[in-house]
Amino acid sequence: MTGPLAGIRILDLTRILAGPFATMVLADLGAEVIKVENPILGDDSRAYGPFIRGESVYFMSLNRNKKGITLDLHNPKGKQILRELARVSDVLVENFRPGTMEKLDLGYDSLKRINPKLIYASCSGFGCTGPYSKKPAYDITIQAMGGIMSLTGEPGGRPLRVGTSIGDIVAGLFTVIGILSAIRARERTGRGQKIDVSMLDCQVAILENAIARYFTAGEVPGPLGTRHPSITPFQQFRSKDNYIVIAAGNQALWTRLCRALGKPELLEDLRFKDNNLRTENQPELERIIEDITVKKTTREWIDMLESEGIPCAPVNTIAEIVKDPQILARNMLAEVTHPVAGRIIMPNLPIKLSDTPGGGQRPAPLHGEHTEDILSELLGLSTQEIEHMKTDNAI
Amino acid sequence: MTGPLAGIRILDLTRILAGPFATMVLADLGAEVIKVENPILGDDSRAYGPFIRGESVYFMSLNRNKKGITLDLHNPKGKQILRELARVSDVLVENFRPGTMEKLDLGYDSLKRINPKLIYASCSGFGCTGPYSKKPAYDITIQAMGGIMSLTGEPGGRPLRVGTSIGDIVAGLFTVIGILSAIRARERTGRGQKIDVSMLDCQVAILENAIARYFTAGEVPGPLGTRHPSITPFQQFRSKDNYIVIAAGNQALWTRLCRALGKPELLEDLRFKDNNLRTENQPELERIIEDITVKKTTREWIDMLESEGIPCAPVNTIAEIVKDPQILARNMLAEVTHPVAGRIIMPNLPIKLSDTPGGGQRPAPLHGEHTEDILSELLGLSTQEIEHMKTDNAI
């Protein structure tokens, strides 16, 4: 199987989540990703539980399809190897705090002299410029500063964290887009360039029209629970055994919904005549609908509403997702066999390509698993030279 | 200024959010995006409020930098024009329900006969295959089915919606990655291909290690409010005037935090000795810390904790984000002047490229604004032929 990025070599200095997620997508798409880790501890996330036979599930589920080498970037020989690798790579990705690579004399300005075609991607909390550039950042601080928490929570309640690390993940996705765009630009210009992605910027970029709306209407949006700010009914309701999401996005669906609920009289109710009125009177409407939805199970409602063509959904937990027939039919659970941990199941690549499919197969590397292979095959080092590197603690 | 995707032509049949978000990113990066709309109503989102002088803020903030033409895809002449445009385009993107383009005889198999190099991207609720393929989907139903809602909410509380349309947006980002990968593959193979992205698959792909953890430990994760599942203290606390997020990710930061809070005795407390114990006893620790944080304002805490090197953040609303010095320094608010609505401010592209920068400048097209230009310049139609198209209601 050859993915669309076959032939692209990525030198991956990233750790924890945002960067490794980006390079995993690139690896899934067929790029050769060489993950560089510190010889002593490796990627911090190797220490994050849970573990299977000592191997971190967190690490393994973010680093499949990559090769792994160790290099001490503070060691002069380690630095030299990194420069040699940058010379023969298309892309370098790192998610250190801005300034770290420069201090090691491995910043973009230094590496582009060695390889002018190198694409250098930096993914950091706040970006390489601006007053916060050097501040530390974590997913939770970025979710807080970037506005998504202010929009998430119970109506009138406190801001809540999005339950996945969306601050990291969205930055990882924009980093991939930046890298692939720069690869395309290089086809035309012959030059590499630096890509600077900030987690905070990425959160601002996904605020939809909240910013334009704020400037237009002066409205500061807050959390709305499960409902939509301007479409009603378009939210979650309690059922007999759980919850049911109903999305009646237009007047025809509203009409069908009232009939399906056995409440045709709602169609005549002046409070709910059109979508604007329904949104204005959402709390009353929610109460009326929920009094009905609690009488049947989620499954019963789905069967009934789907037969009427009304968009609806169960609220799935992880236990339900891993058995869902659509997710299984789409091959969205990748089974990877790790030499130590054994069989692991993780989400697969969600991009299905007809001619050059990619996807997850190979396990994450053991710490330093491919160091000798890469030094000998890619850089032509002899067994003796590699032994010296080890003695010098460079690898 | 020329973005990295200059020279790439995208035929954009997308509507509402997921698809238009994807093609906006492509347009921001310099691709020529030709948005095709129905001659009568156009993109449904032109009807979504709020409005400025009749122009939808929702539409304008998702369609900048694009050209707009009208085409009736049910009209034989309209279909013919679409085929002509597909012949001279690199990429076609659509987010109809699977089967719609085939019914119009405009599916990938039909168009690739006209242009074997065409990259055809479909972004749909459930993808082009599998038992749910033809079901309708909205952001809220996908958030519900994909698991992110089951992880978002108050501890022990009901599942909540993420406050932005993350179901649409993440699918849009993966669609962009698929398109750019296929452009790269075409450089090697000379062939286009079909890209099939499902919103549901994309939600599964961003569940982090929740799936691997479920298979390892049998744990079904639920909502946790603002805290991290395995790092403590790493969450939001109340302050005198609002909230403060504190992220003490390791033992050294924990030590500094206890001192900064004036509670060095916590360092000796057996309940909080290490991160595992703090996570186990998180509710007690939260109470102890919050009793202190409520005594000062968020600003006071940030000044104090930052001076101690402890990662922390305010929980910003949109009103604060638009004044934030970092966001302004990064040029993350694009000012676009629309011919009817005037000046509009919206989030800018969060990918900063050193050699071929992109970004948001040109306003969204008026309905059909570039129809005549494109038909004459790109397809060489005469004024008379264009007039006939109008008479036939094809454009």
Image (tube, coloured by chain):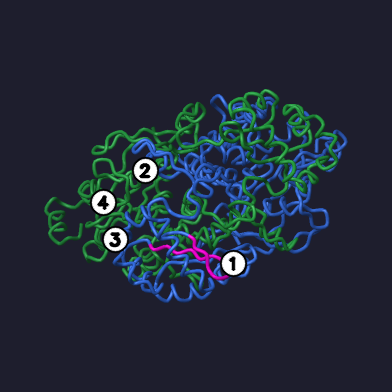
Chain colours: A blue, B green
- In the rendered image, residue A86, in percent from the top left (x then y), is placed at 65, 37
Quarter of the image that includes the C terminus of chain B = bottom left
Marks 1/4: CA distance?
Answer: 37 Å
- In the rendered image, residue A350, in percent from the top left (x then y), is placed at 55, 59
- Tell me if residue A230 comes above or below residue B127 in the rendering: above
The magenta-colored residue range is A236-248
Would you name the residue on which mark 3 appears?
Answer: A270
The amino acid beneath tag 2 is: Ser
Q: Callout 2: helix, strand or loop?
A: loop
Marks 1/3: CA distance?
Answer: 48 Å
Residue A127 falls left or right of residue B252:
left
**Contact between labelled residues 3 and 4, with CB atoms less than 8 Å apart:** no
Labelled disc at residue A331 = 1
Q: Magenta stretch containing residue A319, yes or no?
A: no
Would you name the residue on which mark 4 appears?
Answer: B69
Marks 4/3: CA distance?
Answer: 39 Å
| Mark in the foreground, 4 or 2 | 2
| Mark in the foreground, 1 or 2 | 2
Crowd around label 1: few <14 · some 14–19 · many ≥20 (10 Å): some
Residue B387 falls left or right of residue A125:
left
> Residue B336, located in which quarter of the rendered image?
top left
> Residue A76, located in which quarter of the rendered image?
top right
